[in-house]
Each structure stands twice: as structure tokens, then as C-alpha cells.
Amino acid sequence: MQMIKHFLKYISIFFITVVLLTGLLVASAKIPQSSVRENVKESAEYLCEGKLFGTVVSGAEGSRIDRYADSILLAIAWQYDSEHPLRSVMWSSYYYTDYQNENDNLFDAVTNMYEPNCQYMRYWHGSIAVVRPLLVIFNIQKIYILNGIIMIILTLYLAAVMIKNRMYVPAIGVAAGLIITAFWFVPYSLEYTWTYLIMLLMSVIGVKLALSGKWNCMGIYFLIGGIVTNYMDFLTTETLTLTVPLLLICRIRFHESKNTPDSHKNTSDSHKNIPESHIWKFPGMAALSWGAGYIGMWVMKWIIASVVLHENMVPYISGHIGERLGGDIGISRWSYIFGAVWKNVKCLFPFGYGSAGVIAGIVLMIFALYLVYVYHRKHICKEHVLLYALIGIVPYIRYIILHNHSYLHCFFTYRAQFATVLAIVLIMEELSDWRWLVHDDNRRRKP
């Protein structure tokens, strides 16, 4: 009976969230086209001034900015029909020609008031619920700036919460993840921004919930996180909203004893407070909840679109899935899969920034190995290390499964490795006895 109640609770929350998020998109579609026309036009002019896939740093794939996706997003937002908001939200249509770039198509559509002639219905495009209202006031340049400010605020707040609670190593891990994935380029593209904002917001909420001991809320928390991720994302770095918060929450869960008065006596054995079976149960539940929300939200888009539009969505879905999973670029399957992984690794900062960057990256790796070797811990919880490692390899599993997408779009999919960086730092914390280092330094200072 308890399981049935629990299941019904999750189902109810899922459908309530779907209805609310669908309502937000419909509400944004009700905004008259005339209210956003001026800022959409200014945005189109700005997008036409630059390259669709230009790099900020010459030769560095990790600095490539995707204005192609932003042009399509604005084109869809522009074509929403306030007279038939639900249908236009489901169709997600825009003006398209095959003889010019999407930024030029956007400019022509808003300048000449062209009707939409192409659909992009397989995604929710939920970010339009945010972007379209903002277009009443701002052009896309100002939206980029606003997103950058919000990202900085969330990052600083997350850092403050962790430092306040003496989570120094996880704070270092988050900082390293941001730097190695070149977060300063993220606000340059709307496409890149949403998963980072969701990840940071979920991390703040998740850390605060964990520190407050509200573990019963975690399933719903990850369920809603998966729903919102699918709603907002354009298939970029979707795994970030699961992996990064999960790593931080697991770290808090494993080190709960540090909050007790006697924590300084048993820091290295803090894992003993949690039975081994529970170590794996929580992340399994979190991944299942997030996955159910993510996949369920996608299925709901296809179901709602089929009902509202009286269209068979299967051809659109199967073509989309086949394109992302496979493809033919004239190389062998193994070269394709290995290339997808390697191209994403090469985009990481500083490795993708010339020979100096490669040398700097190698030096950092050697320094990390040196710390682990010299200040290694005698008693290591292998379950913690293994769990962190499994979460850290999630991006590479994604690259292998979606190898076509990951190969062609490595310049933004590489940022999913934020979780890998954080996992490595947390593994270093498990392997290293930082208390011994501090005590050793204190001992040396004594006369």
C-alpha cells in the first residue's frame, strides 16, 4: 500500500509539472508578435553580423559559439501564433530556406513577415517560455548578459553555501569543473546556457536539502530536474543536471559524520555511518527518478502533439533518433565512436589551446597525482571511489551511445565532462588524507 501511494504521488507531481510547464509555453505564445518584433529584428541583425559557428579563440574548438541553434530558437519564438497558442507551441514552426543560413532566414522572416514553412516539433523548446517574454524588453545580446549575470550569482551562492559548511574540496571541484569546461563562453549562446543554469540551481537546492537532512524529498527533486531539463534543453549537455548535483549530494551523504561533535576523530571512517547497500541505493533512485522525468517529458511532448495536431509523430521521432545514434561520415564505426570520445576530451581547457595548453594540462595532472601519492589515505572506502567513478564516466557513455551527435557537436557536448572533473576531485579527496597534511603543517610550526 505504501509503495502504491508513493508511486501515485510521483505520477501526480509528474503530470502537474507537465501541465504547468505547458501552460508557461502557451502563455508566452499569447504575447502578441508585435510586442517582440523590434527586439527580434535587432537580435536577427546581431546574429547576421557574425559567423554561425565562429570560435572566440582561433583554433580552439572549445570556444566555438553556436549561433545556428539560437537563430532557430528565435525563429520559432517569433512565429508563435497568439490566436492558436497551443497548436503553435506543439508545431514549433519557423521560416526556412535551404539556400541561406538560419540567421538570414530569421532576419527575412521578421523583416518581411514571412509565414513559417518548417517544423521542429520533436523538442519542447521550453526555453522560449523564458526567452519570448524577455524579448518584449531585451534583444538577444542583453539576454546573453542577463544569463551570464544569473550564472555568476548562482555559482557564487553555491560556493558560499559549500564554504560555509566546510565543503572545501567539493567547492574546489566545482571551480575546476567550471574552468576546465570554459564556462566563460557558455553565456555567449542560449543553447549552452540552460543546462548550466539548471545544474547550478539544482546543485544549490540539492546541497541545501542534503545539509538539512531532507532525504525524503530527493526522489521528487530529481524527477522534476529531469522534466525541466528535457523541457529546456536542445540536446546539449543534458546529463549535467543529474551528475553534478548527484555527486555533491552523495559527498554530503558520505560525510554526514563530519557534522557531528566527534567528527574530527573519525573523518577517514565517515563512510561507516552508511550501510554498503544504501551507498548504491540512493544514487540508483536518483538516476531512475531523473531518467523517468527526462524520458517521460519527451514522451509527453510527442503524445500531446499527436493529440493536438492529429499528426503521427513516429516518423519524426524515428528519424531523429536514428540521426543521433548513427550516421555516415566516411569512417569506420570504431573510428566514429573513438573519435566522438576523443574530440570531446580535446575540447577541454587548457588542452585545446595549443601546445602551451597541453603542457599546462599535463603539469596539472602530474601535480594531482603527486598529491594523491604523497598524502594518500590508509583507509579508503572503495565503494565511494567506485561510485564517483561511475558517475564520472556517464558523459563518455553518452558520447558512445549518441556518437554521431557527440562527434559533430563536440564543441558543446564536451562540457558534460564537468561531472568527470568533479568526480576526479572527489576521488582525490577519498584517496588523500588532507587532515594529515594540515596536522603535519601545524606540527612543523610548533617550536
Image: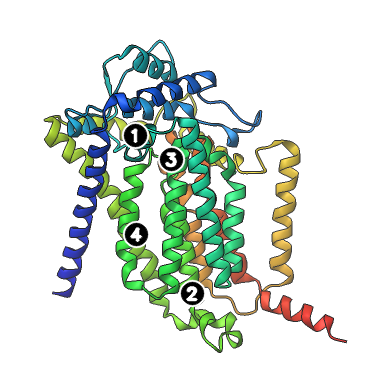
Q: Nearer the viewer, residue 423 or 124?
A: 124
Under tag 1, what secondary structure?
helix
Residues marked 3 and 1 touching at CB (< 8 Å): no
Name the quarter where the N terminus is drawn: bottom left
Q: Earlier in the sequence, mark 1 or mark 2?
A: 1
Q: Quadrant of residue 326?
A: top left
Which badge, 4 or 2, comes first in the chain's sequence?
Answer: 4
Q: Which residue is mark 2?
A: 254
User: Do tag 1 and tag 4 residues touch (Cβ < 8 Å)?
Assistant: no
Q: Residue at x 52, y 81 (%)?
A: 259
Residue 199 rendering spot, x and y as whole percentages: 45, 53
| Front residue (pair 112, 288) | 112
**Mark whose residue sits in front, 1 or 2:** 1
- Residue pictured at 75% horizontal, 45% vertical: 359
Is residue 152 rendered to the left or right of residue 349? left
**What residue is shown with label 4?**
222
Tell me how far mark 4 sits from mark 2, CA to CA: 19 Å
Q: Secondary structure at mark 4?
A: helix
Q: Residues within 10 Å of mark 3 (few under 14, many from 20)?
A: many
Q: Quadrant of residue 325?
A: top left
Question: Looking at the picture, which amino acid does disc 2 mark?
Answer: Phe
Horizontal placement of 25 versus 395: left or right?
left
Mark before the other along the chain sequence, 3 or 4:
4
